[in-house]
Amino acid sequence: MSLRVDQLSWGHPVPGGSWRQLFRNFDFLSPSGQFTVVIGSNGSGKSTFLNLLAGTLRCSTGSIRLNDQPLQQLPDHRRARRIGRVMQNPLEGTCPGLTIAENLRLAAGRRRSAIGWRALTGVHPSRGDRSRYRELLQQLGLPLADRIDTLVGQLSGGQRQTISLVMATLGQPQMLLLDEHTAALDPKAEATVMALTDRLVRQLGTTTLMVTHSLDQALRFGDRLVMLHEGRMLGDWSAQERQHLTPDDLRKMYVSANVTQNS
Amino acid sequence: MISLWLGAYDQGLAYASLALGTYLTLRVLNFADLTVDGSFALGGGTAAVLITNGVPIPLAMLAAMVLGGLAGTVTALIHTRLGVNDLFAGILTTTGLYTTTLRVVGRSNIPITDITPVVNWPTLGQGDDGRWGVALTCVMLGMVCLLALILATDFGLALRSIGNNPTMARANAINQGLGLTIGIAAGNALVAMAGAMVAMYQGFADVTMGIGSLILGLGMVIIGESVFRPRSVPLALFAVVVGAIFFRLMIAIALQLGLEPVDLKLTTAVLLLGAMSLGHIKLPGVNASPLELASEPAALAGSEGEVDAADPSQGERP
């Protein structure tokens, strides 16, 4: 399930009536199953890139192909069938008014059409569904396995993000997009969610892009590290090359890129 | 005296479908649908014209529901395809529906003189009131069971997710536009059904009978939710129906206490305000203050540890 982005362009109006062209003929290739960590300063285009891939934003020119199939022509819901997403805000990735089992059922049914006659057959989540989800959460070592009928709105941010992550990996997604999904969590919850992320991505073998501001995460996780700046790729390191980097090296690159831009 | 209570019970059940339709659009889909005012009158007018022309009651009601559903579809399409705000989309359709209903009915009101029931319902010794009571109880029980079943399927789950968190619904490949359209159409079909039942019950349909329907339906939903505080969808549907009956009972009590019919709308508004305040008034030892209620869900603020310490039974479905 390789991801290929060719000649992607995207810009947006800024206050004052001018136009900011963030991405200009941007190319990106990720081989099947690669776990890419994307870093960069605020406004560098990290989250925008993920939104363009997910279809939340539409690129003006260029092509995005997942497993050699173009994504742009697909309507939102069909594109979403192929992509698992975890958002930055734990409140966005789950339905607070539904139980854990109901949220998982929604995600597991991503490949089916939920609005149609076939979706009217059977009461879900059934007992079988619930026991499967309980087993899945137990296998992942999550204490939430015993609280499958708890409303997600009653969970903490970390727990919600854990459920959101499990949901994103259900339904056999062809690509996983993680947008600063640990940014709103405390260090303990962050460690739990990152350990689970690493485990699920390895198990699933799906092409994954993870945006983060944490340099520690950037140097510890993934097969590849990419640094974006103003919609351009400022650095691209494999896991081996990354071993020679320190957080200070990355910080210096951030600063020098910003200094160059301002001058 | 018993006829007064039975009458209020019957009226409550006749209006219950309006409350269920409002619940579906407002609570399940989180869509403030003002089409309700138009589709209620459209349903009543359609049923009245058809019954007067000798069409069997079930067919007349079905036709009313179909037209109500179409009205809802128009609102949904204006909202989803043209990007018009939900309130404006509803107002536009309702404005157009006034003319549509006038065209269907042919004049401003139409009497329903001859109702031939398909089923000979028992009277329970209470005459027509008893017969209405039995018939409406059976219809509404069936409707609640059907809705509860539909909302428990994958389709229902998808509709609930659209209202609960549209961002998440989109991310999970749910066709939000289609879901909203079907849900709003179904909600308005239910409202049109209520219009048909009310028209049959009161013996006439009027083009202005829908004015204030949304607030009426909302009031019934709020009363039901305030009294029962339901934690599951089937219970919420049941609560909404009972809320409709309570609402009509309160009106009946007000009339019994000597209230003049001209003061009815003001009384309705005060009753609704009272029902809405129920959740915000702190009764020592009975309920928590709004602030305490707001801080209940650990949501974003909490860490793993915080929630582990919370009562795990909170939020469990019964």
Image (tube, coloured by chain):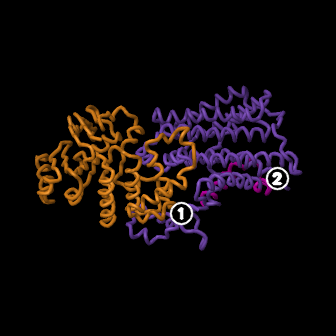
Chain colours: A orange, B purple
Could you say whether the residue bearing mark 1 is in a helix, strand or loop?
loop
For mark 2, does the 10 Å Cα neighbourhood hold few (<14), some (14 to 19), or many (20 or more) residues? some
- In this view of the protein, which residue sits in the foreground, B172 or B23? B172
Q: Position of residue A50 (x, y in %)?
A: 29, 45
Residue identified by numbered label 2:
B4
Numbered range of the magenta stretch: B253-277
Q: Main secondary structure of the magenta part?
A: helix
Q: Is residue B212 visible?
A: yes
Q: Is residue A157 visible?
A: no
Q: Position of residue B244 (x, y in %)?
A: 69, 51
Query: Which one is in front in this view, the residue at disc 1 or the one at disc 2?
Result: 1
The numbered mark at residue A242 is none
Residue identified by numbered label 1:
B316
Location of residue B122 with respect to B246 vertically, above or below: above
Which residue is depicted at the point 13% across and 47% down?
Answer: A262
**Residue B266 covered by magenta stretch:** yes
- Quadrant of the frame with the N terminus of chain B: bottom right
- In this view of the protein, which residue sits in the foreground, B45 or A171? A171
**Please, what is the three-letter code of the amino acid marked with disc 2?**
Leu
Which residue is depicted at the point 41% across and 57% down?
Answer: A163
Q: Please give left or right for residue A113 compared with residue B37 in the image.
A: left
Which residue is depicted at the point 74% across and 41% down?
Answer: B198
**Please, what is the three-letter code of the amino acid marked with disc 1?**
Glu
Which residue is depicted at the point 62% across and 59% down?
Answer: B226
